[in-house]
Amino acid sequence: KQEVTQIPAALSVPEGENLVLNCSFTDSAIYNLQWFRQDPGKGLTSLLLIQSSQREQTSGRLNASLDKSSGRSTLYIAASQPGDSATYLCAVRPRETSGSRLTFGEGTQLTVNP
Amino acid sequence: ETGVTQSPTHLIKTRGQQVTLRCSSQSGHNTVSWYQQALGQGPQFIFQYYREEENGRGNFPPRFSGLQFPNYSSELNVNALELDDSALYLCASSYETHSYEQYFGPGTRLTVT
């Protein structure tokens, strides 16, 4: 059974810092990994999707890496801003022939202080 | 191109009642997945529908059921509500033969009293 763990559970940083969020998964047989952002009481916004054949993806100040063999992904946020405050979730999709269920971690709650 | 929409936004029900939640897929998507997110937890997969057929189910009892319609919109039905069913219910759509990226709706907050 796939398990996804995110460390740390919560993080508070001053504005402008570069930071790294960690995600680990127990079964390396994945199709892809997706990072999401969730604002309080809201739905999920997709940030980055990394296919299992890829090593990293970048979007603006965000960079996500994937090391499938070790079961790890990191989300790097450069020059953090108060607007980045949210919960960040990673999710993996298993390598199955059908179905696209995602297994989520419990998230990292990020607070960026002005 | 419209995104994923869900209705209602909030709902309060009494234990033992039944509830129906609705989801409209993003334009061009043929797959809908439902997730339950308890407070402070990551979303948990309930089930998925692909071309109107159930295509995978998580560890949820049969009182959680669903439908997908020809226009790819979907319903989640929960019978005999329990207090632990209180959660944010998220719908996600995707186009299965493409990147498999899932796009989520804003969710329905269900409170069972």
Image (cartoon, coloured by chain):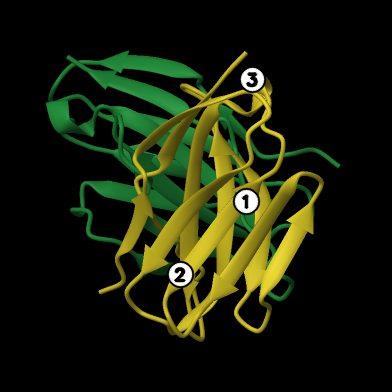
* Residue at numbered disc 1: A76
- Of the image marks 1 and 3, the number of the one nearer the N terminus: 1
Q: Position of residue A78 (x, y in %)?
A: 70, 42
Please give left or right for residue A108 compared with residue A26 in the image. right
* Quadrant of the snapshot with the N terminus of chain B: top right
Chain seen in yellow = A
The label on residue A82 is: 3
Dot 3: few (<14), some (14–19), or many (≥20) neighbours within 10 Å? Answer: some
Res. B69 visible in picture? no
**Count of numbered circles in the view:** 3
Mark 2 chain: A
Q: Position of residue A23 (x, y in %)?
A: 43, 59
> Which residue is at a point 33% across and 57% down the rendered structure image?
A5
Mark 1 vs mark 3, CA separation in Å: 16 Å
What's under tag 1, amino acid-wise? Tyr
Mark 1 vs mark 2, CA separation in Å: 13 Å
> Which residue is at a point 36% across and 50% down the rendered structure image?
A7
Mark 3 chain: A
* Tags 3 and 2 touching, CB below 8 Å: no
Tell me the SS state at disc 1. strand
Please give left or right for residue B107 compared with residue B24 in the image. left
* Quadrant of the snapshot with the C terminus of chain B: top left
Q: Position of residue A26 (x, y in %)?
A: 32, 74
- Of the image marks 3 and 2, the number of the one nearer the N terminus: 2
Q: Judge whether A110 appears above or below A5 on screen.
A: above
* Residue at numbered disc 2: A72
Chain seen in green = B
What's under tag 2, amino acid-wise? Arg
What's under tag 3, amino acid-wise? Pro
Mark 1 chain: A
Tell me the SS state at disc 3. helix
